[in-house]
Amino acid sequence: MDDAALPLTAHLTELRDRILKILVIWIGASLAAWTWKELIFGFLIAPAIQSLGEGATLQFISPTEPFFTYLKCALLAGFVFALPVIFWQIWSFIAPGLYPSEKKVAIPFVMASTLLFLSGAAFGYSFVFPLIFDFFASFESEFVTSGWTLAAVFALTTRLILAFGAGFEMPVVVFFLALSGIVEPRQLLGGLKYAVLISFVASALLTPPDIISQVMLAVPLIVLYLVGVGVAFLFAPKRESGTIAPETPGGGSE
């Protein structure tokens, strides 16, 4: 795409085209994932099954529930497989508004964003899911018998995967806030107390109403916020020093 200034309609057209590309890749990856839907589903619900005990199974209360749950499972897997393309399209859309040197971090941005999302999902799956499902399973007693449905368990699992995956993107968000000049790194560091508050509020909104998952998401968010601030301190001075000049519509520098 040309770096020259574009009218709003051109930006909207480009945004539409990139969204369409994302949807095409996502649907294609989901169709491929449908072949292994049961394998993927079994992997995702493993923490819940372990919490229920050996030999436990999930139930479904609607004839269509298994089909639509497997469909959502394929869509989730397709989304994860398509992440590099999704992040590349996002980068390609915002890149024209960046400085020449900033555009060089395209591949690191795609790789870091993908790895951070996967790391967040893996962290939640490995350390948080067992604690959450154990907590909910602990309410079973002689008066209450668990009858978890596959749709309910998968919905909770999906919600947590997306919450932890998105939450671990914090360093990328903080980095670009500083890189774009919207906020200075020192302001980000000074706003740590607000970041802590927002992390706990976001965790409460994104996770189930239990203190375990909320703390297990909020604490990494705070740590990742500080990581993002540290990275911003390394790169933002290049913009502040004035050694980088923005490109003009003709492709030169002012």
Image (cartoon, rainbow, N blue to C red):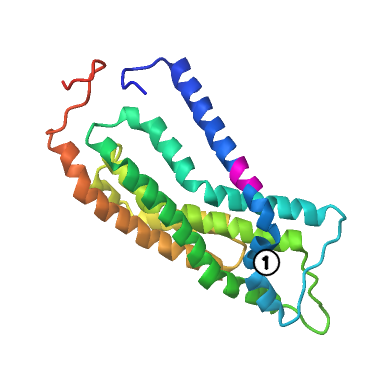
The quarter of the picture where residue 100 lies is: top left
Q: Does residue 153 appear in the picture of this structure?
A: yes
Where residue 37 sits: x, y (%)?
68, 57
The N terminus is located in which quarter? top left
Dominant secondary-structure state across the stretch colored magenta: helix
Q: Does residue 181 appear in the picture of this structure?
A: no
Q: Report the side of 126 relative to 225 (left or right).
A: right
Start-end of magenta stretch: 27-31
The C terminus is located in which quarter? top left
Where residue 215 sits: x, y (%)?
49, 67
Near-viewer residue (104 or 174): 104
The quarter of the picture where residue 179 lies is: top left
Near-viewer residue (82 or 183): 82
Whether 218 is drawn above or below 46: the answer is above
Residue at which label 1 appears: 42
Q: Going 42% across and 39% down the picture, which residue do you hit? A: 88
What's the residue type where badge 1 is placed?
Answer: Gly
Where residue 4 sits: x, y (%)?
31, 18
Q: Residues within 10 Å of mark 1 (few under 14, many from 20)?
A: few
Q: Is residue 157 magenta?
A: no
